[in-house]
Image (spheres, helix red, strand yellow):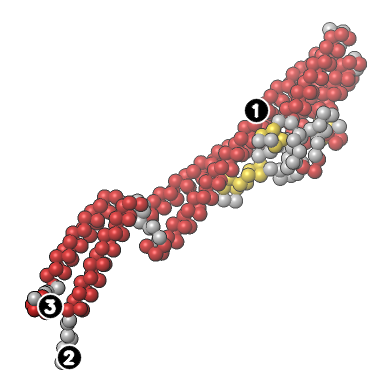
Amino acid sequence: MSVVRITQTMLSKQSFNGLQTSMNRVAKVQEQLTTGRLINRPSDDPTGASSAMRIRSNVALREQYQRNATDAMGWLSQADSTLSSMGDQVRRAHEISLQGANSGSMGPDALRALATEVDQIREGMIDAANTRYLDRPVFGGVTNTGIAYDAAGKVNDPTAVTPTGVLRTVGDGAQVRVDVDARATFGDDSANDSVFDHLADLSAALKAGDQVAIEASIAKLDADGKRITTMQATVGARTNSVENAQGIAADGELTLRTALSEIENVDLAKATVDLNLQQVAYQAALGATARVIQPSLLDFLR
């Protein structure tokens, strides 16, 4: 039977190693309490650190969705208020066309006065069609220019009016168009069949006292008003979609942050108790080491 010889050096090394381990435990719990985090470096918990990185990536994505949704709401809100105002102006022009068609009660001077009002309405409509949000024309599509329509009521950049328009990603696989299709809203200016063309025609007809042309404007402006109302309803539907997506992104972010907290954050009460236990263990280790390491031969020779 072999006998293992225990030397004073071996006892000292083992005791010091034990003390160092105990001190490391105390230091680790102290660090957790100081930082409030269970994982301060990947080596603390490789699996937890990997999960935390994935969750943080998803949190950042949800935050971006919410920023996109906020931007989309700004675009759509601006478009909605503009369309509401323009709808009122078209209805007023429609009323003027009905007044002008009443040939028995309107003289040339009265018709010219109505024509002047129509001209003002048309100018206001063109200005409204150039409404911008963050220096981008709401009705300009993907254009880089500052306006959607020129002074003649024609689309300033026809190549910018695309089927998709300006999009914002507000969720996983969810994109919402935030601009408004100019020609779908105001009519085809390239064929001289837009609301701006109809207003110009009405003004000319009123000045000339052309009852046939005035009566023709009634139906055209009625259709223009309905088209603007339809587009306003479309904008409202997009707004609802963005609000829903924004809520989903916010709920998702909250869920992810809760999961991240469970992985990374310290339970202060538990960590405080653990620190006290580790400190007691360290003190006990110090006492045990003092008893185990007996006086050396040198001490006896003194």
Give the alpha-carbon distance from disc 3 to disc 1, as whole Å.
96 Å
Report the mark closest to the observer, 2 or 1: 2
Q: Position of residue 104 (x, y in %)?
A: 86, 8
Residue 297: x percent and y percent? 11, 79
Closest to the observer, 181 or 281: 281
Residue labelled with disc 2: 2
Other-residue count near label 2 (Cα within 10 Å), few / some / many at <14 / 14–19 / ≥20: few
- Earlier in the chain: of badge 3 and badge 1, it is 1
Crowdedness near tag 3: few (<14), some (14–19) or many (≥20) residues, C-alpha within 10 Å: few
Front residue of 204/142: it is: 142
Three-letter amino acid code at the position of disc 3: Leu
* Disc 2 from disc 1: Cα separation: 95 Å
Pick whichever of labels 2 and 1 is earlier in the sequence. Answer: 2
Mark 3, mark 2: which one is toward the viewer? 3
Which residue shows up at 87% across the image and 8% down it?
A: 109
Question: Which residue sits at x=26%, y=67%?
Answer: 20
Q: Quadrant of the N terminus?
A: bottom left
| Pointer 1 local density, CA inside 10 Å: few below 14, some 14–19, many at least 20 | few
Identity, as a three-letter code, of the amino acid under mark 2: Ser
Q: Position of residue 275 (x, y in %)?
A: 24, 56
Which residue corresponds to mark 3?
Answer: 298
Asked whether disc 3 touches disc 1, contact meaning CB atoms under 8 Å apart, the reply is: no
Mark 1 lies on residue: 81
